[in-house]
């Protein structure tokens, strides 16, 4: 169990923009409370709901573009402090912009370049706390400060990446990765 100070509690609650607070996570400003564990529980519950909604949205639909469009809208709508959520598809050894929500984006990203190109080339999830510290970062939106990118596949072949950006440094953590992995798995199952 992790204890946090009054200042940390206020910052954490503000950053997470928690809309419904249970008595377990309310901060008593005279004492520090174990909030971090409960925030993790809330985030896991949120991703459980997102996974259920994704499953319903994609049920019976095999079209990749339609499914990516609905997933990007769902993630943009449900995740707090996100300024871009969408997909890039692998075409002719580069990533090409697919369905997304947010500001206009870079249309083409070479393999191995930026966070998305690195994720695609390595076949590894990229969890970047501060994109400005990432060597070779491509700034499609100068307001983005953190990013998480997950490759996705069809029959073992890389199709593209799911990319989510935030204006807040350190916005994403392992709970986000775990939740987004579930969403990517739902997409991969839908398009089999």
Image (cartoon, helix red, strand yellow):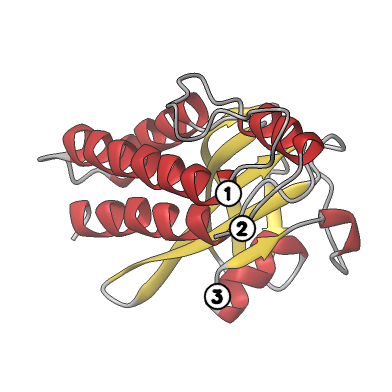
Secondary structure beneath dot 2 equals loop
> Do the residues bearing badges 2 and 1 touch, measured as CB atoms within 8 Å?
yes
Left or right relative to 111: residue 134: right
Q: Quadrant of residue 111?
A: bottom right
Between 174 and 182, the one lying in front of the other is 174
Residue identified by numbered label 1: 36
Q: Position of residue 171 (x, y in %)?
A: 68, 45
**Front disc: 1 or 3:** 1
Q: In the image, which is nearer the foreground, mark 3 or mark 2?
A: 2
- Determine crowd level at label 2: few under 14, some 14-19, many 20+ residues with C-alpha closer than 10 A: few
Q: CA distance from mark 1 to mark 3?
A: 27 Å
Residue located at (17% from left, 34% from top): 56
Tell me the CA gap for discs 2 and 1. Answer: 6 Å
Image x and y of residue 11, in percent: 75, 34
Disc 2 marks which residue? 2
Residue 50 appearing in the image: yes
Q: Which residue is mark 3?
A: 124
Q: Nearer the viewer, residue 13 or 127?
A: 13
Residue 65, image x and y in percent? Answer: 36, 40
Instruction: Determine whether the residue tagged by mark 1 lies in a helix, strand or loop.
Output: helix
Q: Is residue 101 above or below residue 170?
A: above
Tell me the residue at 61%/58% (across/down): 2
Q: Residues within 10 Å of mark 3 (few under 14, many from 20)?
A: few
Q: Is residue 178 above or below residue 83?
A: below
Closer to the chain start, of discs 3 and 2, is 2
Q: Is residue 140 above or below residue 15?
A: below
- 111 with respect to 89 (left or right): right
Give the foreground label among 2 and 1: 2
């Amino acid at each position: 169990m992790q204890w946090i100070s009054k200042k940390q509690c206020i910052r954490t609650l503000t950053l997470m923009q928690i809309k419904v607070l249970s008595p377990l996570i309310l901060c008593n400003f005279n004492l520090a409370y174990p909030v971090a564990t409960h925030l993790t529980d809330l985030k896991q519950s949120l991703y459980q709901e997102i996974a259920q909604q994704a499953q319903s949205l994609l049920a019976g639909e095999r079209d990749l573009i339609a499914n990516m469009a609905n997933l990007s809208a769902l993630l943009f709508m449900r995740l707090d402090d996100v300024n871009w959520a969408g997909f890039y598809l692998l075409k002719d050894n580069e990533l090409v912009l697919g369905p997304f929500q947010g500001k206009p984006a870079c249309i083409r990203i070479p393999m191995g370049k930026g966070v998305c190109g690195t994720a695609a080339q390595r076949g590894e999830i990229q969890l970047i706390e501060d994109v400005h510290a990432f060597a070779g970062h491509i700034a499609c939106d100068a307001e983005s400060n953190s990013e998480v990118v997950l490759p996705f596949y069809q029959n073992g072949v890389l199709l593209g990446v799911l990319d989510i950006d935030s204006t807040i440094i350190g916005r994403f953590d392992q709970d986000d990765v775990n939740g987004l992995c579930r969403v990517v798995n739902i997409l991969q199952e839908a398009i089999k």
